[in-house]
Image (cartoon, coloured by chain):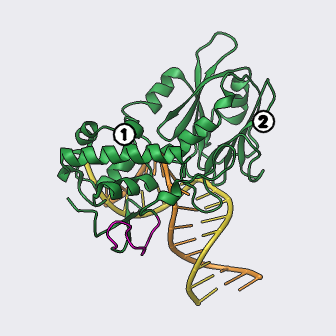
Chain colours: A green, B yellow, C orange
Amino acid sequence: MPELPEVETMCRGIGDVIGQTIVSVATPRRTRRPSPISPPPRRLATELLGQRIEAIERVGKRAVLHLRPSRASASARLVIEPRMTGLLLRVPPPTEQHVRLIVEFQAGGPPLTFWDRRGLGTIRLLDAATFATRCGPPLIGPDALSLRGDWLYEAIHASQRSIKVALLDQRVTAGIGNIYAAEILFAAGVDPRSRCCRLSRAVCDSLARHCRRILQRAIRLEGSSIGDETYRTADNRPGRFQRCHQVYGQTDAACPRCGATIRRIVQAQRSTWFCPGCQRRR
DNA sequence: CGTTCAACCTGGGCGC
DNA sequence: TGCGCCCAGGTTGAAC
């Protein structure tokens, strides 16, 4: 579920935990294997107790809490990856059943909850050095919110794969997922099947420009919520950017730009929606 | 290098 | 009503 705009909205929505000290940690659900929680729940709880949240940062589609220990030791990062259905909440979760993490604070107030229906999300506590290795370049490319055409061109121009697949590659740019890839390609008028190596510098500029614009707008509208059991803000409200979707999920609808019929195809085992009328193959 | 598949999970929707 | 199947915002590793 959550892509860049949704994770950004969650990070902003839990901003009031900055400066707070952790006094209680619970991980109610037994975990699958390999464990999505690392270190394992017991040790995670021990290590989090007494730490203060210094800052919250979004890295691609991950929420990263910067922690400061009460006693001198290396500072740490709590990295939460919501994957398909994970939510960071400051209000009671939709069900008790899928609560994965509850963090309570010294000052009282509502706990911070990680709720994840499908349970594919991950929670990792990493020291600063490990965090840099696992969540930085070259594994994680430049943030999609400030994607530049020259970078995009350099990153993909020698590649044979399709542009849709490349946009989903977090090493190329971090934060784009299936919804926004489709919307960006539509806005730029580029056929998702186009080979990267056929894209000019000018087309990369256009893709980068539309990428920044669409993601900014989606953040302003607090992300995309599709259906009931889907993404919610930290106070459990739906986002509003789904109203602006032009092609995502619009099989057989008329293209809002040219009237042709929107098509669904599958690329890399994922649905892609596009307009065969006005998205040009390069 | 690029593509495909399976896994990790839960649950909604649809056809029969 | 119930069953079986397909689908879903993501990521990873193995096989070809």
Asked if the magenta segment contains residue A10, the reply would be no
Q: Which mark is residue A191?
A: none
- For the image, the number of numbered tags is 2
Disc 2 target residue: A110
Residue A56 image point, x, y percent: 58, 29
Tell me what residue is drawn at x 39 percent, y 73 percent.
Answer: A254
Residue A96 image point, x, y percent: 78, 50
Please state if A188 lies on the left or on the right of A125 as rendered: left
Tell me what residue is drawn at x 78 percent, y 35 percent.
Answer: A110
Q: Residues within 10 Å of mark 1 (few under 14, many from 20)?
A: some
Please state if A90 lies on the left or on the right of A139 as rendered: right
Which is more toward the observer, A237 or B7?
A237
**Magenta region: which residues?**
A249-259
Quadrant containing the C terminus of chain A is: bottom left
Disc 1 target residue: A171
Could you tell me the amino acid type at mark 2? Pro
Please state if A123 lies on the left or on the right of A281 as rendered: right
Describe the element under mark 2 as helix, strand or loop: loop
Could you tell me the amino acid type at mark 1? Arg
Q: Is residue A69 above or below residue A194?
A: above
Tell me what residue is drawn at x 40 percent, y 42 percent.
Answer: A170
Q: Residues within 10 Å of mark 2 (few under 14, many from 20)?
A: some
Q: Using the image, name the chain to which the residue with label 2 belongs.
A: A
Tell me what residue is drawn at x 22 percent, y 62 percent.
Answer: A281
Residue A158 visible in the displayed image: no
Q: Main secondary structure of the magenta part?
A: loop
Q: Is residue A117 above or below residue A156?
A: below
Which is more toward the observer, A40 or A248?
A248
